[in-house]
Image (cartoon, rainbow, N blue to C red):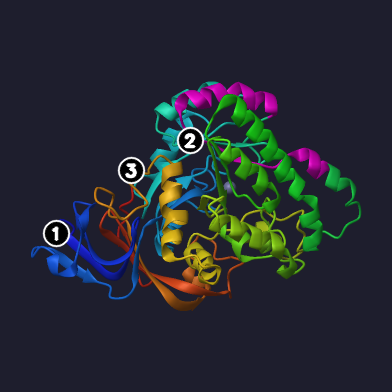
Amino acid sequence: MDSMAQAFVSERVVTPDGVIPAAVLEDGGKIRGLCRRDEIPPDYAVHDFGNLAILPGLVDSHVHINEPGRTEWEGFRTATRAAAAGGYTTLVDMPLNCLPETTTVAALEAKRETARGKCFVDWAAWGGVAGDNAEHIGPLAQAGAKGFKCFLIYPGCEGFEMVTREQLERALPHVVSTGLPLLVHAELSGPIEQAATGLNGADWRQYQTYLRSRPDEAEWAAIRLLLDLCRHYRFRLHIVHLATALALRDLRAARREGLPVTVETCPHYLHFAAEEIADGNTLLKCAPPIRTRDNRERLWSAIWYKDIDLVATDHSPCPPEMKREETGRFDEAWGGIASLSVALPVVWTGMPARDLPLSDLARLMAAQPAVLAGLGGRKGKIAAGYDADLVVFDPEAEIEVTPDRLHTRHRISPYLGERLLGDVVATYVRGREVFREGEFAPEPSGMEV
Ligand SMILES: [Zn+2]
């Protein structure tokens, strides 16, 4: 069965050149090409999906798998199952919240060891630029890390060190010589400390308190600092999880100037709005915080104008007790939202009304994240020579998010009960069916790419 060539047929195949009726021909895990239905060679097994859309398998360039070391939070097996159910075929793992953090080659090797035989989709790893580990940057790149992540502020979790401006400037020449991107959590502590002075005695059950504690200015100031450094060192700068629209003008100007800057936002910033978050609902705590409705609309507008390149989940699960739902205190709760299984319908739900078609969905959630991770020649597109990573998607289906749809280790999510547009019907990794209508492949077959 696996060795037999296959044709995936649909009226709506989402290719880089548009949405067309076609058969996607797969052989040996690769896309051999596209053809008309009546041109399928006779020895191909045909899967006809009718009017369901066939998208390139999604690539999530921002996932916290948390293994080794915090497998009780998530882990390769559960994260990659959740990914398969969500239409993701490649995950790129962040270097923190696991133990050891991926800041040395030995830690990367430990991660590979623990991932073996557990993955339902393909994966890759980011390395960390943390504290004074500059001498590990070159070796990590040599060993196969796809790029590097750093924090300009305390990461919210013991172990992974933030970098000061001085540490970052020592690291940047090493990053530049690898040619790989540096992904940055862009918040500075100055504006956050300043905001804290106005929060004495504030009620930490109120979402407004949390929002005021991490102001737009913290992101904006960090981004201005990073753009200055990018102008000086010319490293590939990637802003992860942009939450504030306030920084968009500077980012746009920097790109016009020719600086190598890319920008990501996340499903939760596009779906929720601060005005709608109930006090005590710590499931929606993340950093930077979900901002106003008006801010959300400006993020969508930036997507329309391509000032935001991609949407990644920042899937960051934790055990339920860490969300402190019993107290509802935002200062005590873990900041992180898990969304791998539902991110595709979450993002798609917002798109038709904003005049964004399926081809933009494929660009934002497959092609561009693949390019960021150096996988742009192999993942993220339905085109000849690419891996046959496909997701069969019903764009018109209406679903309600229920716990059985989550597939993460802990089935807690702020999306529970949300009504969304679109449903993942089946997911294929290198031609192999890994998920279909609620069922998973019996054996994991994902690999590091
Ligand atoms: Zn993250």
Q: Residues within 10 Å of mark 3 (few under 14, many from 20)?
A: some
Residue 288 shown left or right of residue 49 in the figure = right
Instruction: Please state the horizontal and vertical placement of residue 61, each as a whole percent of the image.
Output: 48, 48
Task: Determine which residue is flagged by label 1.
Answer: 4
The residues colored magenta run: 164-193
SS category of the residue bearing label 3: loop
Toward the viewer: 22 or 96? Answer: 22
Q: Vertically, is 142 above or below 63? A: above
Disc 1 residue type (three-letter): Met
Q: Quadrant of residue 290?
A: bottom right
Name the residue at 85% across, 43% down. Answer: 194
| Residue at (39, 39) in percent of width and height | 113
| Relative side of 44 to 261, left or right | left
| 3 vs 2, front mark | 3
Q: Residue 228 location in percent, x, y? A: 66, 31
Find numbered disc 2 in the image and state the secondary structure of the residue it sits on.
loop
For residue 228, side relative to residue 331 (left or right): left
Q: CA distance from mark 1 to mark 3?
A: 24 Å
Q: Which residue is mark 2?
A: 147
For residue 49, side relative to residue 212 (left or right): left
Say whether residue 187 is magenta. Answer: yes
Asked whether 89 falls inside the magenta stretch, the response is no
Residue at image mark 3? 377
> How dense is the environment of label 2, judged by Cα within 10 Å: few (below 14), some, or many (20 and up)?
many
Label 1, secondary structure: give it. loop
